[in-house]
Every structure is written in C-alpha cells, then in structure tokens.
Amino acid sequence: MTVRSSTAAAVLAPVMTLALLTGCSTPAEPEASPSPAASSASSTPSPSAPAVKTPGMKKDLAGFATSLYTGESVPASGPAAQALKKAQAPGKAATVKASTGTWNKEHFAVLTSGKDVTLVVKKKGSWTAVGGWWPSLGIPKEALGGKRHVLLMGSDAREKQGEKIEEARADALQLVGVDGHGGGGVMGIPRDLWVPQANGRNAKINSALSTGGPDAQTKVVSKATGLPVQGYVLTGFTGFQKMIDELGGITIKAPMKVRAVEKGTQKVDGYDAFWFTRERKTLPNGDFDRTSNQGIALAGIGAKAVAEGPSGLAKILDIADEHVSTDLTAAQALTFGAWAYRIELKKMGHQVPTADYGRSADGQSILEITGATRKVFADFKDGNLSK
C-alpha cells in the first residue's frame, strides 16, 4: 500500500518546526555591538540613497537592514553569500519589517520588504544573511541551498513518569525533503520496518532511538533508506501538544474519523492532534494509516505558517524551539523551512512506502522491506516525491 497526499506541501515550514520537544531554552537576546556592515549604515542614508524604514527593530538589526537596502555590502554566508554579490542598487525607498526568534540557542530574524525575504542569524554578535530572495534587488531566484532531507521524530517517552525522550522508542518518523528546484516531499516511515541497527543485528527501525539516541536513529534511517539526512528534530508527547496549543491549534483534513476528530476539514487543539497522530488500532490499515495521519498533522502546522507569510516561519520556529531537541543550526532550519514559500504544489508529494507483514525469529510482528519499498526510497533521492 502506498499513501499519497497533496496537502503535505505545507509541511516544510516547520522543520521544522516542525515537529516538535523539550530541551532547548530561549535566552534573552543580547544587545550586541553593531557589525561592520551595520556600523557603516545609518537610518538616515546619504542623499543619493533611498530611505529605509525599520519600524520596531533593535539598532543592530536596523543597521543591517539599512545597509542591505542602501546598496552597501552586508555579512553573508551559505546560499546568501553568492546571491547577494549580484545585488543591484535599490531604486526606491524600502520599509523592512522583522520577525525574530531563537532556534537551538541561536538568535535569528526573518526580514521582509515587499516580496523580498532575508533570513539572518546572529553570529558572534553580528547579523549575517544566510538565505532568502530579493526581487527588488534584481535577485528573483531563491538562495536557500540545494536538495536535502531532514528527519522529524516523535518519541513515545512517558515524560510525566520521568522517561527521557532521547531514550525511548520513536513513535513517529517522517522524512522531509526538498529538491532545490521548487519541489519536495514527506515520506512517512512505518516504525515496524525490520532493518539493520548499529550493532549489525536487525530490529524494528524505531528502536534505534532507545538504544543510541537521536543521532543513532538518524543514521539507521539514512542507512535503511539510502538517503543522506542533514539533521533531525525530535519531540515528545507533551512537547507536541503544547506546541500545537501555543500555535492556537491547527487545521487538518482528516481522511476518516479518528477518535474525536471527525472526517473532513476541521481545527484541532494539541490533545486531539496528538491522538489523531497516535491512534492506529482502530484504523483500517493500522500503522500505515497512522503514519499517513502524522504527515497530515505536520502539513497542518506548515499550512499555518504559510498562511501567515514568511513571518509565520519565525513564529513557528521560535515556538517549536521550546519543545524540541535538534542538531539543526538556525541557518539550516531557516533555509530549509523557507522552501515552504517557494514550493509548487504539483511538485510536492507524500507517501508511506509499502512493506510486507512478517514475523521475526523471536516472534515479533514486523514489516519487511520489499522491492516496492526500495523504489519509494530511490524516488525520494532527489528530494521530490511528486512523481
């Protein structure tokens, strides 16, 4: 059985948000010394440069934005470095707005001006552009990096009983990808797939989290699928529910009734979203349907960010930061999540690969990888599942 859903297009915004547990703190943003680019800029530009308005911004971030829109060079790295070298002098006054947040102990901001979007991260006290797109500066094509995959994990740890999310089994595994050309995909991984572990023995794919932590789980998924994984985002039951509630709930399109969630489009809170993604015993196709529902819930989180525009990405990442454990840097999370605003729906797919039911030597009910399973893995190698 292969499950598809076009609604998954919106899921990229969370990477990363996605997704989703406790551990990362949110330190107060320091007032840093202006960067070289910022110190040379002023909110009162020279008579030959267009005016730049930066309402509500702190001085150092306003200096960065002013430099960018008065034709001065700004610190840049990653995908933004080469793109901004081609920037043309701005032809008119600009108003730049900022949405800020924290991800994995790094401060970031999403700057918007008209159709322009600039993703910036504070590095060593200075703001640095890491990605974006700037049609007003003659750079219409996005600078967000090429294809990559990120693993979103949900732990089944009973946090109220003192269990740690990094030491329990993975209850949800969703691999999100982008192809770097406006396409992408979300592949749900059934947790009972029987695959080689780090010790060389076979076990259910979700057991790697409990035996080796999130790094080990990421490596096992990468080896089993043959896909390189840039990083992970991990959450637990409590973190997932709190994040949904702090977002004000999400809208999902349920393919069937799942507990209190009726079939069709509706808004759900953290509690109902949690059970929608966890229930399997009453579903016709068991774990396959549950894995598909997890992708649908992620799509609901992403759809909320897309509806709010690029500033919604900053909001979701900042909220998620309180409830997730991750090895993604702020630059990686921003440039990956921003693809949600550049994806074409027809180039986005969602699949749960087929697998055969079986029984292990010690009597466990398992899912065995088949040629059809491997075909889905191979199709996802380019970061796109829309075929």
Image (cartoon, rainbow, N blue to C red):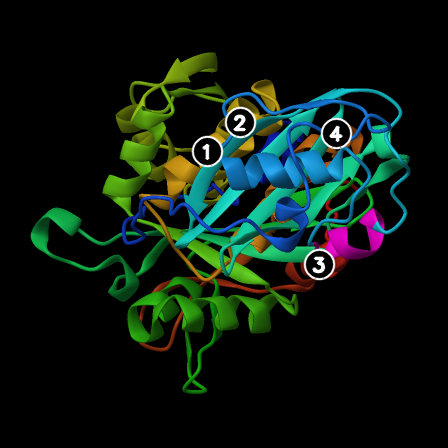
Q: Residues within 10 Å of mark 4 (few under 14, many from 20)?
A: some
The kind of residue tagged 3 is: Gly
Q: Residues within 10 Å of mark 2 (few under 14, many from 20)?
A: many
Q: CA distance from mark 3 to mark 2?
A: 22 Å
Residues rendered magenta in the picture: 76-84
Circle 3 sits on which residue?
A: 78
Disc on the earlier residue, 3 or 2? 3
Report the quarter where the C terminus lies: top right
Label 4: state its secondary structure. Answer: strand
Q: Residue drawn 58% across and 19% down? A: 307
Circle 2 sits on which residue?
A: 312
Residue 293, visible in the rendered structure? no
Which quadrant of the view contains residue 23? bottom left
Q: Residue drawn 75% across and 51% down? A: 80
Q: CA distance from mark 1 to mark 2?
A: 6 Å
Which quadrant of the view contains residue 197? bottom left
Query: Mark 1 and 2 residues: CB-CB less than 8 Å, in contact?
Result: yes
Q: Does residue 208 lie above or below 127 as drawn?
A: below
Disc on the earlier residue, 4 or 3? 3
Label 1: state its secondary structure. Answer: helix
Report the quarter where the N terminus lies: top right
Circle 4 sits on which residue?
A: 116
Question: Residue 280 has which mark?
Answer: none
Q: CA distance from mark 2 to mark 4?
A: 15 Å
